[in-house]
Image (spheres, rainbow, N blue to C red):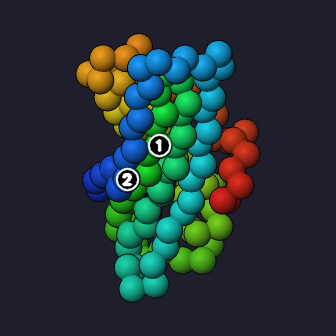
Amino acid sequence: MNIQLNNWEIANINYSHFDNEIREDNSFSLRFKKVFKNKEKNNFKIVFFLNIEDKNFDLNIDAVFSFTTDEKITEDFKQSHFPRINAPAIAYPYLRAYVSNLTLQSGTNPVMLPTINFVKFKNPDD
């Protein structure tokens, strides 16, 4: 089966900058979910939910990555490693670059998200 990242988009973004507040700690959380729609036999989506609390801003992003297959998606495929490990690993670098560029262009210290090994990633939505 041939699988391709077809497109991606930022579905929701919320950025709040705090001029006078400075946190002592930063935090980062990431979850994702797989979305399979019954009417779309050759498509599936990976939706990331990202939350960053930096020293002087909060950033929340929901990003949707759409994949296309050249064969009908089966139940076996839905339970396989590809939508749980490979597809998020393919999509995540795009989100990582987006966050880095966004924070750089926003006049704050640029945020470089950590690399993630999706084989070991514990995802509550998985």
**Would residue 65 be visible to someone looking at this image?**
no
Is 44 situated above or below 108? below
Q: Residue at x 72, y 39 (%)?
A: 120
In this rendering, position of residue 87 left or right of residue 15 = right
Is 87 situated above or below 125? above
| Crowd around label 2: few <14 · some 14–19 · many ≥20 (10 Å) | few
**Would residue 13 be visible to someone looking at this image?**
yes
In this rendering, position of residue 80 left or right of residue 38 = right
Give the labeled residue for mark 1: 60
Q: Residue at x 60, y 20 (%)?
A: 23
Residue 122, position in %: x, y?
Answer: 73, 45
Amino acid type at circle 2 is Asn
Amino acid type at circle 1 is Asn
Residue 10, position in %: x, y?
Answer: 33, 50
Residue 3, position in %: x, y?
Answer: 39, 57
Residue 115, position in %: x, y?
Answer: 56, 26
Task: Please tell me whether mark 2 sits on a helix, a strand or a loop.
Answer: strand
Give the labeled residue for mark 2: 12
| Crowd around label 1: few <14 · some 14–19 · many ≥20 (10 Å) | some
Q: Residue at x 56, y 53 (%)?
A: 32
Image quarter for residue 30?
top right
Q: Residue at x 36, y 24 (%)?
A: 103
